[in-house]
């Protein structure tokens, strides 16, 4: 049953993405100011399909730490492709830090920059870092909520990776607190996994790390949040789901 539901969701996801990608061509040519709203509409439909077809729902905790408006800097764990979607509907004006290669994906890739996403050339060295800081300052001036995944890649539940230092440079540059976020999304939607297991994905925002921290202290504090505040195993049966989204 899980295999059939997963196959149905994948068909829904790729079909929806293709159709809306085609619909987005005139938008990115003539109405780029609506690109973010269009992307949020697409993600809303994807997550609705995930809920109905695969039985995956979302529970939010600690979101009193996440501003409902104005700039913010959110450092989230990254366990699956789900994490790259969900913040689009959790925040009013999100701006993801993402790898530059994603902007070259057919149909939807060209919408990422008009939507205000921050593309990072991971092989660009110091020039890429300077570009990241300029884009971060512009996003903050535009009252965007910036989402970055400091682990740098999808990480299996329970696995630990050294955190990338870009988050510390961004925080120092714009003098914003860093909001650590935990997730267990990999238990339902694994890294590069075809199967989508029914259950609840928890997204937990922790108290912010204050602005002005030194690079080493910030990275250490964030790593401790990710490790010591790691989610305990949860009952992911459908009957135990608390639907929040």
Image (cartoon, grey):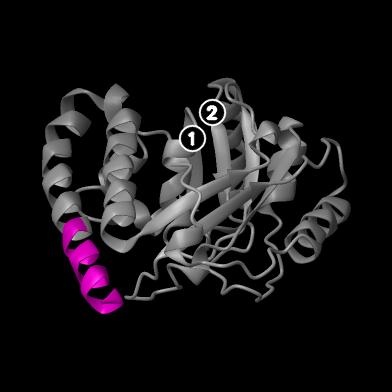
The structure residue drawn at horizontal position 77% and vertical position 60%, both measured from the top left corner, is 229
Decide: few, some or many residues near mark 1? Use Cα within 10 Å; few <14, some 14-19, many ≥20. many
Q: Element at badge 2?
A: loop
Q: Is residue 4 magenta?
A: yes
What percent of the width, then of the height, locates residue 38?
27, 33
What percent of the width, then of the height, locates residue 151?
63, 63
Residue 117 is at least partly visible in this image = no
Mark 2 and mark 1: Cα distance apart in space: 6 Å
2 or 1: tag closer to the N-terminus: 1
- Report whether 138 appears left or right of 171: left
Q: Which residues are magenta?
A: 1-12
Q: Element at badge 1?
A: strand
- Any mark on residue 144, and which? 2
The structure residue drawn at horizontal position 57% and vertical position 44%, both measured from the top left corner, is 60
- The secondary structure making up most of the magenta span is helix
Q: Is residue 67 magenta?
A: no
What percent of the width, then of the height, locates residue 98?
47, 52
- Any mark on residue 94, and which? 1
The structure residue drawn at horizontal position 51% and vertical position 62%, both measured from the top left corner, is 185
Viewport quadrant of the C terminus = top left
- Report whether 20 appears left or right of 67: left
């Amino acid at each position: 049953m899980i295999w059939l539901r997963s196959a149905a969701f994948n068909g829904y996801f790729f079909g929806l993405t293709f159709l809306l990608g085609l619909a987005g061509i005139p938008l990115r040519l003539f109405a780029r100011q609506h690109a973010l709203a269009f992307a949020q509409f697409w993600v809303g439909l994807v997550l609705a399909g995930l809920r109905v077809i695969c039985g995956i729902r979302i529970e939010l905790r600690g979101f009193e730490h996440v501003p409902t408006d104005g700039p913010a800097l959110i450092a989230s764990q990254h366990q699956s492709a789900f994490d790259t979607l969900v913040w689009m509907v959790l925040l009013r004006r999100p701006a993801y830090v993402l790898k530059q290669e994603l902007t070259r994906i057919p149909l939807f890739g060209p919408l990422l920059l008009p939507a205000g996403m921050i593309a990072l050339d991971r092989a660009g060295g110091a020039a890429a870092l300077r570009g990241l800081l300029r884009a971060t300052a512009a996003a903050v001036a535009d009252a965007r909520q910036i989402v970055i995944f400091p682990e740098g890649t999808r990480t299996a539940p329970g696995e630990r990776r050294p955190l990338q230092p870009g988050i510390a440079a961004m925080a120092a540059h714009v003098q914003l607190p860093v909001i650590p976020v935990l997730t267990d999304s990999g238990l339902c939607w694994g890294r590069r996994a075809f199967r989508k297991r029914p259950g609840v994905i928890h997204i937990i925002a922790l108290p912010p790390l204050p602005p002005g921290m030194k690079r080493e202290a910030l990275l250490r504090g964030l790593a401790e949040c990710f490790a010591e505040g790691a989610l305990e195993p949860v009952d992911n049966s459908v009957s135990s789901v608390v639907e929040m989204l």
